[in-house]
Amino acid sequence: MTTPLYREDAYARTAPGRVVRLTPEGGVVLEASLFYPNGGGQPGDTGHLAWPGGRMAVATTVKGEAGEIVLVPAEGETPPPAGAEVTQTLDWDRRFAHMRVHTALHLLSVVLPRPVTGGAIGTEKGRLDFDMPKAPEDKAALEAELNALVVRDLPVTEDWITDAELAADLGLVKTMSVAPPTGAGHVRLIRIGEGGDQVDLQPCGGTHVRRTGEIGRLRLGKIEKKGRQNRRVSLHLED
């Protein structure tokens, strides 16, 4: 199982690493990974590995077998050998944009408190699909409410509960299409705000900014009908 360094510090841009093995497809499995693997609507990280006499561009990062994280080489790149000591370097601008959008989507689920049926995260925009028969009537008011949460510069922190505690409080789960990762005995929660200023608490394995003020100004995009009960709401980073 790969140690997820991105969970210990989402702001770390470089880190040492050791190659545990190469997959049959040529993917690189490290003992501990700075790279976030594709999941929960958040794309896998990109960047590069470097070692004495070599360098490999990372095209994406995916989940492998038994908790492994696999770094996929860009086309034509040669991976480091098993056992090699490497330096991991993220494409930081891309990752930080994902962190801003991901946290913004949590805020979107606050101003639109409906069950979430899907979502996607990009570098400039993101979207959530809601179980919502009718589109919101006042889009401008929603956008203002969303940006007010950003301006409050609320802290974004993590907490952990057991699988049993989550099962006893399923109201924490907003997503209908993706179940929280359970089975390890504990589940990570992302909290926005604290004490009386807490606005959100939900299971999530992704990377986030430390404070909502880092998101920057947001603009609500299209609200599209996606089936009888579903509406797709897009948001864009404006800064």
Image: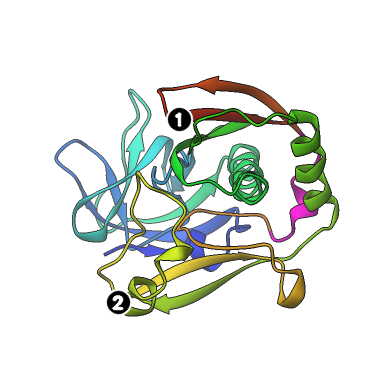
Q: Mark 1 packing: few (<14 Cα in 10 Å), some, or many (20+)?
A: many
- Outermost residue to the left: 24
Mark sitting earlier along the chain (2/1): 2
On whether residue 216 falls in the magenta region, the answer is yes
Residue at (40% x, 23% y) in the render:
227
Residue at mark 2: 185
Residue at mark 1: 230
Q: Is residue 35 left or right of residue 156?
A: left
Residue 90, image x, y percentages:
55, 45
What's the residue type where badge 1 is placed?
Asn
Residue at (38% x, 72% y) in the render:
166
Q: Nearer the viewer, residue 47 or 80?
A: 47
Q: Classify 50 as above or below 12.
A: above
| SS under mark 1 | strand
Q: Quadrant of the C terminus?
A: top right
Q: Mark 2 packing: few (<14 Cα in 10 Å), some, or many (20+)?
A: few
Q: Classify 63 as above or below 173.
A: above
Q: Is residue 44 left or right of residue 68?
A: right
Residue at (60% x, 54% y) in the render:
208
Residue 153, image x, y percentages:
81, 58
Q: Nearer the viewer, residue 101 or 129?
A: 129
Of the numbered discs in the image, which one, if any, rests on residue 212?
A: none
What's the residue type where badge 2 is placed?
Gly
The answer to whether marks 2 and 1 mark residues whose Cβ atoms lie closer than 8 Å is no
| SS under mark 2 | loop
Mark 2 vs mark 1: give the one in front.
1
Residue 5, image x, y percentages:
47, 63
Q: Classify 114 as above or below 209.
A: above
Q: Nearer the viewer, residue 135 or 196?
A: 135
Q: Quadrant of the N terminus?
A: bottom left
On whether residue 85 falls in the magenta region, the answer is no
Identify the magenta region: 210-218
